[in-house]
Image: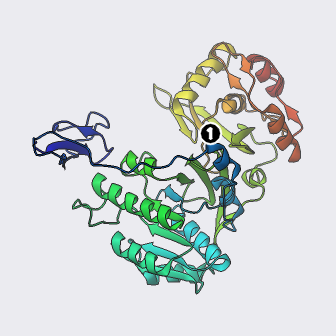
Amino acid sequence: MKSKSSFVCASCGTAHPAWVGQCKSCGEWNTLEERVIAPTTLSNGMTTRPAATAISSQDIASLAATPLARQGTGIDELDRVLGGGLVPGSVILLAGEPGIGKSTLTLQLAASIAEKLGTVLLASGEESAQQIALRATRTGRAHKELRLIASTDIDAILATAEVERPRLLIVDSVQVMQSTISNSSPGSVPQIRAVAESLMRFAKTTGTPVVLIGHVTKDGEVAGPRVLEHLVDVVLTLEGDRYRDMRLLRTMKNRFGATSEVGVFEMAETGLAEVANPSEAFLSERGEQPIGSAITVMLEGTRPLLVEVQALTAPTSFGYPRRTASGFDLNRLNLLIAVLQRHAGVSLDSSDIFVNIVGGLKISEPAADLAVALAIASSKAKRPLPPDLTIFGELGLSGEIRSVSQLAKRQAEAKKLGFGKTVIEKNLAAAVKKYLNVK
């Protein structure tokens, strides 16, 4: 039987039966690469599968009764996101924008594990060993048990790891590594798959946790094929504005725990410092009675965070008013503006509107709708909201204020920081009149 060919997209990993100029899945052009599939044949030309040995099954009840072994990292915020620590044999992908702090965080993790457990092997294909050593010295993370390799040859890295048997292996980054299993260029779908499979095999056979550093695209997605995210056990993303200090570590996938947790860090001279009270940090520079400012309580996983929403309205200089949002969905903002005009009588037809979530955060949950709406109304009316007021609620298209999840937890976090009042009105018009004294 003849060999068959499959054409795989180097951008998203989708297989096509024939070559086409544009991938039907991701829309990218000229990204399809041919992959030859050689079938197993018998003497009569029929295909068959190779003989296999039966595998004994296991009792799931007895396996479930055995607690999952974890090793604390020494970084509480990282342990929170991982679900309690590193699991032996797990493969973790840490992704984020350039300069956001991925290498710094993994260096802190490496130094902590080296101090507690022993040898940690850090392999970098993007920086020299001297560059990493300089960063370790600057941040106070230099340790004799922290071993460095500057190479893009994943086979040589794994051979070294087999000899040295580290307690943790860190690879920076998976997109630049190359395996002899594939002849493709680094960063292509076959190459990333080959590298990831080799690291996964090493982790599972030796019980060594492996941390991979990955790049992200301009859209914030993990660079490379989706197969990379499917292969690893945990996917973490480090978010934040590189020009600000706050960093959020989120879990996108976790086979050993919840995916709803978030860790909060602050970039300091010695690396990423854990933030014990994120709400207080986000509100530390807020004025006494600022116009166009509202405080809402967002939930990041199981953690409530107080966040300041700022809005600015200004007379438009053009025929079509501008709508700009930072950290908030622009389509959602346009919807809230329409509700404000229709049901609260706030005239915004000739006003440019700018909305900003302070601290470089991004809010996606609808519980922030009311805070955004009242911040816009406050800016338009040029009147501040009460300084001890926290606002959370989803707005309906009829102007009604809908309830939010985990209300008690949000209120408890607000009271902890001295915010004793909460919006209790049932509709937007009543809330605008009461809290802004607008007739």
Res 108 visible: yes
Identify the residue at horizontal 50%, vertical 28% (top origin): 321
Horizontally, residue 238 falls left or right of residue 284, namely left
Residue drawn where x is 58% and y is 33% of the image:
353
Task: From the top left corner, tell me how far across and down residue 376 is, in percent.
Answer: 66, 31
Residues 133 and 320: in front is 133
Q: Which residue is mark 1?
A: 363
Residue 304 pos. (x, y %): 75, 43
Which of the image's four quarters has the N terminus?
Answer: top left
Residue furthest toward the bottom? 144
Query: Position of 65 compared to 7: left or right?
Result: right
Q: How many marks?
A: 1
Q: Is disc 1 placed on a helix, strand or loop?
A: loop
Q: Is residue 314 above or below residue 418?
A: above
At horizontal 59% and vertical 83% (from top left) the residue drawn is: 142
Q: Is residue 222 visible?
A: no
The quarter holding residue 29 reads top left
Q: Quadrant of the C terminus?
A: top right
Front residue (pair 1, 390): 1
| Side of 320 where 268 appears, left or right | right
Mark 1, other Cα within 10 Å: few <14 / some 14–19 / many ≥20: some
Classify 254 as above or below 111: above
Q: Name the image quarter holding residue 129.
A: bottom left
